[in-house]
Amino acid sequence: MIPLRDRNPSGSFPLVTLLIIVTCTVAFLYELAAGPDLKRVLYEYALIPGHVTEGLQNGRLGLAGAAAPFFTMMFLHGGWLHLIGNMWFLWIFGDNVEDTLGPVRYLFFYVICGLAAGVTHYLLGPSSALPTVGASGAIAGVLAGYAVLFPGARVLTLVPLGFFIRIMDLPALAVIGIWFVIQVISSFLSFGMTETGGVAFSAHVGGFVAGLLLVWLFRPRRVVV
């Protein structure tokens, strides 16, 4: 399923959401511009669990150095489809969450969900030598926040039905819920396969769970769910 737009207009301009999209796009263009030097860029800014573990064990990395890739990995992406898919989901669901939480709370909420996603991925494969990038974990937290804050919202969605594709008006809870179930199943199926590459589904699950919990802390008290 591909969400096209939600039927839940935002009451304010989504400045932080737009800034995140611009930052991720600029970071990806920087990756492309690196060319043959991309490996060095990923080594410095992607989350490579094995490097963090080794750096902490031999004292090469201090606390700040070990924590840095958990932040920077959120703004890098592995390809155009990866970037566009993430930013599309963020644009559809992020504006309403930002409108409700306010720009400052929303920014902290987004970053903390991204950190939770990175930590989840790290804990499940601390020796992995594969670089992990992407805003998916943070955006998973935004989806969870949207589900909690707007349980009655509806989303215009592109739904493949065999050889046919239909555009359907679906409950946001159904769209987000199906997405999360797929992430959980995929995470279990890929458990222990930290050296084979692919999508970090466990990070998506970690970010989503963090979003479910944190949105209750970050939402203004005046919001009625």
Image (cartoon, rainbow, N blue to C red):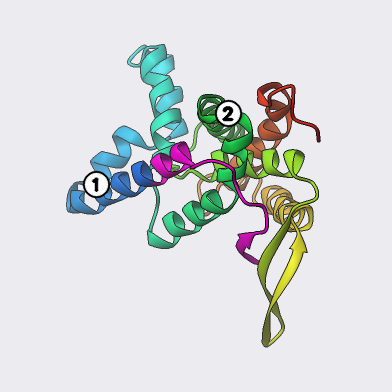
**Does residue 16 belong to the magenta stretch?**
yes
- Mark positioned earlier in the residue sequence (1 or 2): 1
Mark 2, other Cα within 10 Å: few <14 / some 14–19 / many ≥20? many
Q: Position of residue 112 (x, y in %)?
A: 56, 27
Q: Is residue 131 visible?
A: no
- Residue type at the position of mark 1: Tyr
Q: Is residue 50 visible?
A: yes
Marks 1, 2: nearer the viewer: 2
- Observer-nearest of 14 and 129: 14
Q: Is residue 69 above or below residue 199?
A: above
Q: CA distance from mark 1 to mark 2?
A: 26 Å
Tag 1's secondary structure?
A: helix
Mark seen at residue 212: none
Tag 2's secondary structure?
A: helix
Residue bearing the label numbered 2: 109
Image marks 1 and 2: residues in contact by CB distance under 8 Å: no
Q: Is residue 156 above or below residue 47?
A: below
- Observer-nearest of 222 and 159: 222
Residue sitting at 68 percent across and 54 percent down?
Answer: 186
Q: Which residues are magenta?
A: 1-21
- Observer-nearest of 199 and 197: 199
Residue bearing the label numbered 1: 30
Dividing the picture into quadrants, the one containing residue 157 is bottom right
Q: Position of residue 33 (x, y in %)?
A: 19, 52
Q: Position of residue 14 (x, y in %)?
A: 49, 42
- Residue type at the position of mark 2: Phe
Left or right, residue 191 beside residue 196: right
Quarter of the N terminus within the rendering: bottom right
Quarter of the C terminus within the rendering: top right
**Does residue 8 belong to the magenta stretch?**
yes
Dividing the picture into quadrants, the one containing residue 67 is top left
